[in-house]
Image (cartoon, rainbow, N blue to C red):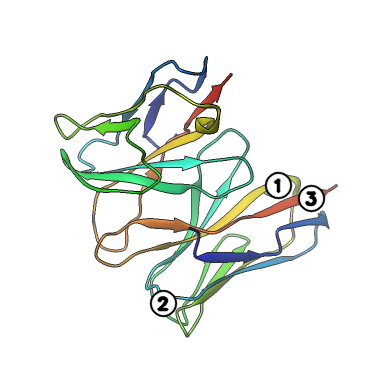
Amino acid sequence: GQQLNQSPQSMFIQEGEDVSMNCTSSSIFNTWLWYKQDPGEGPVLLIALYKAGELTSNGRLTAQFGITRKDSFLNISASIPSDVGIYFCAVKTSGTYKYIFGTGTRLKVLA
Amino acid sequence: DTGVSQDPRHKITKRGQNVTFRCDPISEHNRLYWYRQTLGQGPEFLTYFQNEAQLEKSRLLSDRFSAERPKGSFSTLEIQRTEQGDSAMYLCATWEGGVNTEAFFGQGTRLTVV
């Protein structure tokens, strides 16, 4: 079953607001990833994190790889309507290189 | 356009029928994954190939499911005797295998079993 817990499950925000979501695991992982999925489409990679404590940005998105290697957060600044979608965290297992996905955070932006 | 192509995008089938999906990877990506995603859930791992070798299968992959990658390029996923519980999005992803690189996902095949 799923090993990653994401919170919140869903959120409504006003356009222009900042958004924060996080992802936790009971196990240690060395690669943490954040994906966005639009309805009817496959997940698209937003940010990849490879080093504990690392803070990485991609435009208005910033993600951090927790120092314990058991968590990560994603921030979106100044949200816009096209940020609507489902955001998944994922980890890549060592050795077998499989991807395990979280339960997702559904984001809705009110104009 | 991620470069991973899946066909068909949508499939409606009657319970008990067999269905086959195809995935064409980004060229020279030797790792290919199949995932299943049900409504409101994250993608769940089904199986993966390294070139033509199928290296791992999830317990989710019942004996009605079979996947192949005959020449290490495209892959097919077949579901025999479909059940309503098989209704889901089936996602394919491929990876070149390099350090600090990740897999690209296709757009998926949405299966509805009626």
Q: Amino acid at mark 3?
A: Val
The kind of secondary structure element at disc 1 is loop
How far apart, in angstroms, are the residues tagged by discs 3 and 1?
6 Å
Q: Position of residue B108 (x, y in %)?
A: 47, 32
Q: Position of residue B75 (x, y in %)?
A: 27, 30
How far apart, in angstroms, are the residues tagged by discs 1 and 2?
30 Å
Dot 1 or dot 2: first in sequence order is 2
Quarter of the image with the N terminus of chain B is: top left
Q: Is residue A53 above or below residue B104?
A: below
Q: Amino acid at mark 1?
A: Val
User: Is the residue marked by circle 3 packed among few (<14), some (14-19), or many (20+) residues within 10 Å?
Assistant: some
| Residue designated by label 3 | A109
Q: Chain of mark 1?
A: A
Question: Are the residues tagged 2 and 3 within 8 Å (C-beta)?
Answer: no
How far apart, in angstroms, are the residues tagged by discs 2 and 3?
33 Å
**Left-right relation of A44 to A84:** left
User: Is the residue marked by circle 1 packed among few (<14), some (14-19), or many (20+) residues within 10 Å?
Assistant: some
Dot 2 or dot 3: first in sequence order is 2
| Residue designated by label 1 | A84
Question: Are the residues tagged 3 and 1 within 8 Å (C-beta)?
Answer: yes
Q: Is residue B82 above or below residue B98?
A: above
Q: Position of residue B51 (x, y in %)?
A: 16, 41
Looking at the image, is mark 1 or mark 2 nearer the viewer?
A: 2
Give a yes or no on whether discs 1 and 2 share a subunit.
yes
| Residue designated by label 2 | A28
